[in-house]
Amino acid sequence: MGNDQVLIFGAAGHLGLPLARWIRYKSPETKLRLVSRNADQRHRLQADFPDAEVVAADYLDPGSMAAALEGISAAFIVTPDFLDEQKAMEILCAEAKSKKSLKQIVRILGNLPYTTLSEIPEKWRSVGGTLTQHHVARAVLDDSGLPVTYLNMPAYLMDDLVRWSGPIREQSLLVMPYDRRHSWVDPTDIGEAAANIIMSRDDRHIGQYYDAECGYEVFRFGDVANILSDVFRRHINYDDSPETWRSLNGPRYKALYGDHAEEYFLAFYHFEQTHEFSVRNSNVLETLLAREPTSLRSWIKCNANAVLPQ
Ligand SMILES: NC(=O)c1ccc[n+]([C@@H]2O[C@H](COP(=O)([O-])OP(=O)(O)OC[C@H]3O[C@@H](n4cnc5c(N)ncnc54)[C@H](OP(=O)(O)O)[C@@H]3O)[C@@H](O)[C@H]2O)c1
Protein backbone atom coordinates (compact mmCIF):
# COMPACT_ATOMS: atom_id res chain seq x y z
CA MET A 1 0.00 0.00 0.00
CA GLY A 2 2.95 2.29 -0.73
CA ASN A 3 1.27 5.55 -1.66
CA ASP A 4 -1.98 4.86 0.10
CA GLN A 5 -3.32 6.94 2.94
CA VAL A 6 -6.02 5.62 5.21
CA LEU A 7 -8.39 7.99 7.01
CA ILE A 8 -9.59 6.66 10.36
CA PHE A 9 -12.45 8.32 12.22
CA GLY A 10 -12.70 7.61 15.93
CA ALA A 11 -8.97 6.82 15.83
CA ALA A 12 -8.61 7.21 19.59
CA GLY A 13 -11.56 4.89 20.23
CA HIS A 14 -11.82 1.17 20.92
CA LEU A 15 -12.39 0.24 17.25
CA GLY A 16 -10.33 2.89 15.44
CA LEU A 17 -7.22 2.60 17.62
CA PRO A 18 -6.71 -1.16 17.14
CA LEU A 19 -7.36 -0.63 13.44
CA ALA A 20 -4.64 2.04 13.23
CA ARG A 21 -2.20 -0.10 15.24
CA TRP A 22 -2.81 -3.16 13.07
CA ILE A 23 -2.16 -1.23 9.85
CA ARG A 24 1.00 0.34 11.29
CA TYR A 25 2.22 -3.12 12.33
CA LYS A 26 1.27 -4.98 9.15
CA SER A 27 1.87 -2.24 6.61
CA PRO A 28 4.17 0.42 8.05
CA GLU A 29 4.52 2.09 4.66
CA THR A 30 0.80 2.96 4.62
CA LYS A 31 0.19 6.54 5.65
CA LEU A 32 -2.42 7.18 8.29
CA ARG A 33 -4.65 10.20 8.79
CA LEU A 34 -6.14 9.86 12.26
CA VAL A 35 -9.22 11.79 13.33
CA SER A 36 -10.42 12.87 16.73
CA ARG A 37 -12.50 15.89 17.66
CA ASN A 38 -10.83 15.98 21.06
CA ALA A 39 -7.56 17.92 21.44
CA ASP A 40 -6.21 15.73 24.26
CA GLN A 41 -6.88 12.61 22.23
CA ARG A 42 -5.12 14.17 19.24
CA HIS A 43 -2.03 14.85 21.39
CA ARG A 44 -2.05 11.24 22.59
CA LEU A 45 -2.47 9.95 19.03
CA GLN A 46 0.37 12.10 17.74
CA ALA A 47 2.66 10.77 20.48
CA ASP A 48 1.63 7.17 19.74
CA PHE A 49 1.81 7.65 15.92
CA PRO A 50 4.58 10.19 15.26
CA ASP A 51 4.49 9.50 11.51
CA ALA A 52 0.74 9.93 11.12
CA GLU A 53 -1.23 13.02 10.26
CA VAL A 54 -3.56 13.72 13.18
CA VAL A 55 -6.52 15.95 12.39
CA ALA A 56 -9.84 17.18 13.76
CA ALA A 57 -12.93 16.57 11.64
CA ASP A 58 -16.66 16.35 12.34
CA TYR A 59 -19.19 14.41 10.29
CA LEU A 60 -21.56 17.35 10.58
CA ASP A 61 -19.04 19.96 9.39
CA PRO A 62 -18.63 19.81 5.57
CA GLY A 63 -15.45 21.91 5.50
CA SER A 64 -13.63 19.63 7.93
CA MET A 65 -14.88 16.55 6.04
CA ALA A 66 -13.64 17.90 2.70
CA ALA A 67 -10.19 18.48 4.19
CA ALA A 68 -10.08 15.09 5.95
CA LEU A 69 -10.99 13.20 2.77
CA GLU A 70 -8.48 14.99 0.55
CA GLY A 71 -6.02 12.59 -1.07
CA ILE A 72 -6.99 9.48 0.89
CA SER A 73 -7.44 6.01 -0.57
CA ALA A 74 -9.65 4.42 2.11
CA ALA A 75 -11.79 5.64 4.99
CA PHE A 76 -13.02 3.98 8.15
CA ILE A 77 -16.32 5.37 9.39
CA VAL A 78 -17.68 4.76 12.88
CA THR A 79 -20.41 6.93 14.34
CA PRO A 80 -21.67 7.51 17.88
CA ASP A 81 -25.15 6.63 19.10
CA PHE A 82 -27.80 9.21 18.20
CA LEU A 83 -25.76 10.98 15.52
CA ASP A 84 -27.98 12.56 12.82
CA GLU A 85 -26.92 9.91 10.30
CA GLN A 86 -28.98 11.30 7.44
CA LYS A 87 -27.13 14.59 7.60
CA ALA A 88 -23.74 13.09 8.46
CA MET A 89 -23.77 10.50 5.65
CA GLU A 90 -25.11 13.04 3.12
CA ILE A 91 -22.16 15.31 3.97
CA LEU A 92 -19.71 12.40 3.80
CA CYS A 93 -21.08 11.28 0.42
CA ALA A 94 -21.17 14.78 -1.04
CA GLU A 95 -17.54 15.40 -0.07
CA ALA A 96 -16.32 11.89 -0.93
CA LYS A 97 -17.77 11.86 -4.44
CA SER A 98 -15.29 14.42 -5.74
CA LYS A 99 -12.27 12.59 -4.27
CA LYS A 100 -10.95 10.49 -7.12
CA SER A 101 -8.29 8.78 -5.00
CA LEU A 102 -10.90 7.26 -2.65
CA LYS A 103 -11.23 3.53 -3.40
CA GLN A 104 -12.97 2.18 -0.33
CA ILE A 105 -15.12 3.14 2.66
CA VAL A 106 -15.53 0.69 5.53
CA ARG A 107 -18.59 1.61 7.57
CA ILE A 108 -19.48 0.17 10.98
CA LEU A 109 -23.12 -0.76 11.50
CA GLY A 110 -25.03 -2.23 14.45
CA ASN A 111 -28.14 -4.06 13.26
CA LEU A 112 -29.57 -7.41 14.23
CA PRO A 113 -29.57 -9.74 11.20
CA TYR A 114 -32.67 -9.51 9.00
CA THR A 115 -34.17 -6.53 10.83
CA THR A 116 -35.50 -3.62 8.79
CA LEU A 117 -36.43 -0.02 9.50
CA SER A 118 -40.13 -0.76 9.11
CA GLU A 119 -40.00 -3.19 12.07
CA ILE A 120 -38.88 -0.47 14.49
CA PRO A 121 -41.81 0.70 16.63
CA GLU A 122 -43.29 3.85 15.05
CA LYS A 123 -42.89 5.78 18.29
CA TRP A 124 -39.09 5.54 18.15
CA ARG A 125 -38.47 5.91 14.43
CA SER A 126 -38.30 9.71 14.49
CA VAL A 127 -36.01 9.74 17.55
CA GLY A 128 -33.03 8.22 15.71
CA GLY A 129 -30.49 6.34 17.80
CA THR A 130 -29.32 2.75 17.64
CA LEU A 131 -32.71 1.32 16.70
CA THR A 132 -32.75 3.15 13.37
CA GLN A 133 -29.52 5.04 12.71
CA HIS A 134 -27.62 2.28 10.93
CA HIS A 135 -30.50 1.60 8.54
CA VAL A 136 -30.66 5.32 7.78
CA ALA A 137 -26.92 5.53 7.20
CA ARG A 138 -26.89 2.49 4.95
CA ALA A 139 -29.68 3.86 2.75
CA VAL A 140 -27.74 7.09 2.14
CA LEU A 141 -24.48 5.24 1.44
CA ASP A 142 -26.17 2.69 -0.85
CA ASP A 143 -27.78 5.51 -2.86
CA SER A 144 -24.46 7.30 -3.23
CA GLY A 145 -22.85 4.63 -5.39
CA LEU A 146 -19.63 5.04 -3.39
CA PRO A 147 -17.44 1.94 -2.84
CA VAL A 148 -18.67 0.88 0.60
CA THR A 149 -18.06 -2.29 2.65
CA TYR A 150 -20.35 -2.70 5.67
CA LEU A 151 -18.94 -4.22 8.82
CA ASN A 152 -22.08 -4.88 10.83
CA MET A 153 -21.81 -5.86 14.51
CA PRO A 154 -24.97 -7.81 15.36
CA ALA A 155 -23.42 -8.28 18.78
CA TYR A 156 -22.51 -6.58 22.03
CA LEU A 157 -18.98 -5.24 22.21
CA MET A 158 -17.23 -7.16 24.97
CA ASP A 159 -16.00 -4.00 26.66
CA ASP A 160 -19.62 -3.00 27.28
CA LEU A 161 -19.04 -5.10 30.38
CA VAL A 162 -16.65 -2.37 31.58
CA ARG A 163 -19.29 0.30 30.88
CA TRP A 164 -21.79 -1.78 32.87
CA SER A 165 -19.38 -2.71 35.65
CA GLY A 166 -20.64 -0.35 38.40
CA PRO A 167 -23.24 -2.81 39.78
CA ILE A 168 -20.85 -5.74 39.13
CA ARG A 169 -18.25 -4.12 41.40
CA GLU A 170 -20.59 -2.70 44.01
CA GLN A 171 -23.34 -5.31 44.25
CA SER A 172 -22.00 -8.39 42.42
CA LEU A 173 -24.86 -7.83 40.00
CA LEU A 174 -25.16 -7.89 36.22
CA VAL A 175 -28.16 -5.73 35.32
CA MET A 176 -29.77 -6.10 31.90
CA PRO A 177 -33.51 -6.07 31.35
CA TYR A 178 -35.27 -8.47 28.98
CA ASP A 179 -32.97 -11.48 29.10
CA ARG A 180 -32.31 -12.56 25.54
CA ARG A 181 -29.99 -14.46 23.27
CA HIS A 182 -27.12 -12.33 22.00
CA SER A 183 -23.74 -12.55 20.31
CA TRP A 184 -20.57 -10.80 21.45
CA VAL A 185 -17.50 -9.41 19.75
CA ASP A 186 -14.10 -8.04 20.84
CA PRO A 187 -13.71 -4.41 19.62
CA THR A 188 -10.03 -5.08 18.89
CA ASP A 189 -11.02 -7.93 16.56
CA ILE A 190 -13.39 -5.60 14.71
CA GLY A 191 -10.61 -3.02 14.31
CA GLU A 192 -8.26 -5.68 12.95
CA ALA A 193 -10.91 -7.05 10.59
CA ALA A 194 -11.54 -3.56 9.21
CA ALA A 195 -7.79 -3.09 8.78
CA ASN A 196 -7.48 -6.41 6.92
CA ILE A 197 -10.29 -5.43 4.55
CA ILE A 198 -8.59 -2.09 3.83
CA MET A 199 -5.05 -3.53 3.50
CA SER A 200 -6.22 -6.32 1.19
CA ARG A 201 -7.02 -3.74 -1.53
CA ASP A 202 -9.35 -6.45 -2.84
CA ASP A 203 -12.28 -4.68 -4.42
CA ARG A 204 -14.44 -7.78 -4.03
CA HIS A 205 -15.02 -6.51 -0.48
CA ILE A 206 -16.87 -3.55 -1.96
CA GLY A 207 -20.62 -3.95 -1.70
CA GLN A 208 -20.30 -6.70 0.92
CA TYR A 209 -22.30 -6.61 4.15
CA TYR A 210 -20.43 -8.59 6.79
CA ASP A 211 -22.16 -9.69 9.99
CA ALA A 212 -19.21 -9.88 12.35
CA GLU A 213 -19.62 -11.53 15.75
CA CYS A 214 -17.09 -13.67 17.56
CA GLY A 215 -18.59 -16.89 16.23
CA TYR A 216 -18.74 -18.85 19.47
CA GLU A 217 -21.82 -19.40 21.59
CA VAL A 218 -24.87 -17.19 21.62
CA PHE A 219 -25.45 -16.33 25.27
CA ARG A 220 -28.34 -15.19 27.39
CA PHE A 221 -27.35 -12.52 29.89
CA GLY A 222 -27.87 -15.04 32.67
CA ASP A 223 -25.14 -17.14 31.00
CA VAL A 224 -22.88 -14.08 30.90
CA ALA A 225 -23.33 -13.63 34.67
CA ASN A 226 -22.30 -17.29 35.08
CA ILE A 227 -19.13 -16.76 33.02
CA LEU A 228 -18.29 -13.66 35.06
CA SER A 229 -18.83 -15.69 38.24
CA ASP A 230 -16.56 -18.51 37.03
CA VAL A 231 -13.76 -16.17 35.95
CA PHE A 232 -13.88 -14.10 39.15
CA ARG A 233 -14.65 -17.10 41.36
CA ARG A 234 -17.27 -14.96 43.00
CA HIS A 235 -21.00 -15.22 42.49
CA ILE A 236 -22.33 -12.51 40.14
CA ASN A 237 -26.11 -12.45 40.22
CA TYR A 238 -28.21 -11.55 37.23
CA ASP A 239 -31.16 -9.14 37.48
CA ASP A 240 -33.40 -8.79 34.41
CA SER A 241 -35.93 -6.40 35.88
CA PRO A 242 -36.49 -3.13 34.01
CA GLU A 243 -37.06 -1.44 37.37
CA THR A 244 -33.58 -2.28 38.69
CA TRP A 245 -32.10 -1.06 35.40
CA ARG A 246 -34.11 2.18 35.61
CA SER A 247 -32.97 2.92 39.14
CA LEU A 248 -29.28 2.11 38.50
CA ASN A 249 -28.82 3.39 34.92
CA GLY A 250 -31.76 5.64 34.05
CA PRO A 251 -30.24 8.91 35.31
CA ARG A 252 -26.90 8.22 33.57
CA TYR A 253 -28.54 7.48 30.22
CA LYS A 254 -30.76 10.55 30.51
CA ALA A 255 -27.69 12.71 31.20
CA LEU A 256 -25.91 11.21 28.17
CA TYR A 257 -28.73 11.15 25.61
CA GLY A 258 -31.64 13.25 26.90
CA ASP A 259 -34.92 12.72 28.75
CA HIS A 260 -36.25 10.06 26.39
CA ALA A 261 -33.14 7.86 26.85
CA GLU A 262 -34.42 5.67 29.68
CA GLU A 263 -37.56 4.63 27.77
CA TYR A 264 -35.61 4.45 24.52
CA PHE A 265 -33.04 1.95 25.74
CA LEU A 266 -35.70 -0.19 27.40
CA ALA A 267 -37.53 -0.22 24.03
CA PHE A 268 -34.24 -1.13 22.33
CA TYR A 269 -33.61 -4.05 24.69
CA HIS A 270 -37.21 -5.20 24.28
CA PHE A 271 -36.84 -5.04 20.50
CA GLU A 272 -33.75 -7.24 20.77
CA GLN A 273 -35.67 -9.73 22.90
CA THR A 274 -38.52 -9.98 20.38
CA HIS A 275 -35.93 -10.54 17.62
CA GLU A 276 -33.62 -12.83 19.59
CA PHE A 277 -33.97 -15.72 17.16
CA SER A 278 -32.29 -13.63 14.45
CA VAL A 279 -29.09 -13.79 16.51
CA ARG A 280 -26.66 -16.44 15.36
CA ASN A 281 -22.97 -17.06 14.97
CA SER A 282 -20.95 -17.31 11.81
CA ASN A 283 -17.35 -17.73 10.69
CA VAL A 284 -17.37 -14.35 8.91
CA LEU A 285 -15.11 -12.64 11.45
CA GLU A 286 -12.80 -15.66 11.56
CA THR A 287 -12.47 -15.41 7.77
CA LEU A 288 -11.72 -11.69 7.89
CA LEU A 289 -9.16 -12.15 10.66
CA ALA A 290 -7.68 -15.39 9.28
CA ARG A 291 -7.58 -16.63 12.87
CA GLU A 292 -10.00 -17.54 15.62
CA PRO A 293 -11.72 -14.49 17.08
CA THR A 294 -11.57 -13.84 20.82
CA SER A 295 -14.28 -15.59 22.82
CA LEU A 296 -16.22 -13.79 25.54
CA ARG A 297 -14.70 -15.95 28.27
CA SER A 298 -11.15 -15.23 27.03
CA TRP A 299 -11.88 -11.52 26.77
CA ILE A 300 -13.20 -11.43 30.35
CA LYS A 301 -10.14 -13.34 31.57
CA CYS A 302 -7.76 -10.93 29.80
CA ASN A 303 -9.65 -7.84 30.95
CA ALA A 304 -10.70 -9.01 34.40
CA ASN A 305 -9.12 -6.03 36.14
CA ALA A 306 -11.01 -3.54 33.99
CA VAL A 307 -14.34 -5.19 34.82
CA LEU A 308 -13.68 -6.02 38.47
CA PRO A 309 -10.39 -4.79 39.92
CA GLN A 310 -8.96 -7.55 42.11
N1 LIG B 1 -21.42 -0.79 22.07
C1 LIG B 1 -21.93 -1.85 21.49
O1 LIG B 1 -22.11 -2.90 22.09
C2 LIG B 1 -22.32 -1.80 20.05
C3 LIG B 1 -22.79 -2.98 19.46
C4 LIG B 1 -23.12 -2.96 18.11
C5 LIG B 1 -23.00 -1.79 17.39
N2 LIG B 1 -22.57 -0.64 18.00
C6 LIG B 1 -22.44 0.57 17.20
O2 LIG B 1 -21.06 0.80 16.99
C7 LIG B 1 -20.83 2.19 16.84
C8 LIG B 1 -19.69 2.60 17.73
O3 LIG B 1 -20.07 2.38 19.05
P1 LIG B 1 -19.09 2.82 20.18
O4 LIG B 1 -19.68 2.32 21.43
O5 LIG B 1 -17.70 2.43 19.78
O6 LIG B 1 -19.27 4.41 20.05
P2 LIG B 1 -18.30 5.55 20.57
O7 LIG B 1 -17.41 5.01 21.61
O8 LIG B 1 -19.18 6.73 20.85
O9 LIG B 1 -17.39 5.86 19.29
C9 LIG B 1 -17.76 6.69 18.27
C10 LIG B 1 -16.50 7.34 17.67
O10 LIG B 1 -16.93 8.27 16.71
C11 LIG B 1 -16.21 9.49 16.86
N3 LIG B 1 -17.18 10.57 16.67
C12 LIG B 1 -18.24 10.85 17.45
N4 LIG B 1 -18.96 11.87 16.96
C13 LIG B 1 -18.31 12.27 15.83
C14 LIG B 1 -18.54 13.29 14.88
N5 LIG B 1 -19.60 14.12 14.98
N6 LIG B 1 -17.68 13.43 13.86
C15 LIG B 1 -16.60 12.61 13.75
N7 LIG B 1 -16.32 11.61 14.62
C16 LIG B 1 -17.17 11.45 15.65
C17 LIG B 1 -15.64 9.51 18.28
O11 LIG B 1 -14.31 9.97 18.22
P3 LIG B 1 -13.83 11.40 18.83
O12 LIG B 1 -14.78 11.74 19.93
O13 LIG B 1 -12.43 11.10 19.29
O14 LIG B 1 -13.89 12.33 17.66
C18 LIG B 1 -15.67 8.04 18.71
O15 LIG B 1 -14.39 7.45 18.75
C19 LIG B 1 -22.13 2.90 17.17
O16 LIG B 1 -22.68 3.33 15.98
C20 LIG B 1 -22.98 1.82 17.83
O17 LIG B 1 -24.36 1.97 17.55
C21 LIG B 1 -22.19 -0.64 19.30
Image (cartoon, rainbow, N blue to C red):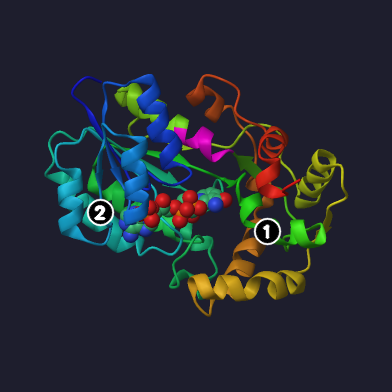
- Name the residue that disc number 1 marks: 274
Report if residue 111 is visible in the image. no
| Residue 261 location, quadrant | bottom right
Q: Residue at label 2? A: 57
Horizontal and vertical percent for residue 74?
A: 26, 34
Most foreground residue, 9 or 73: 9
Question: Secondary structure beneath disc 2?
Answer: loop
The magenta stretch is 186-191
Count of marks overlaid on the render: 2
**Contact, mark 2 vs mark 1 (Cβ under 8 Å):** no
Location of residue 210 in the rendering, given as x and y in whole percent from the top left corner: 47, 35
Identify the main secondary structure in magenta.
helix
Q: Which mark is residue 217?
A: none
Residue 114 in magenta stretch:
no
Judge from the rendering whether residue 164 lies leftward or rightward of residue 26; answer left or right: right
Disc 1 secondary structure class: helix
Position of 284 relative to 86 (above/below): above
Q: Residue at left 63%, top 32%?
A: 215
- Residue type, mark 2 in image: Ala
Which quadrant is home to the N terminus? Answer: top left
Find the residue positioned furthest to the bottom: 259
Q: Residue 238: which quarter of the image?
A: bottom right
Residue 90 seen in the current view: yes
Residue in the picture at 21% in, 27% down: 4
Which part of the image, by quadrant, shows the C terminus?
top right
Q: Position of residue 123 (x, y in %)?
A: 52, 75
Answer left or right for 31 relative to 255: left
Query: At x 72% / y 60%, what residue is drawn?
Result: 176
Identify residue type, mark 1.
Answer: Thr
- Give the CA distance from mark 2 to mark 1: 38 Å
Is the residue marked 2 within 8 Å of ligand 1, measured from its CB? Answer: yes
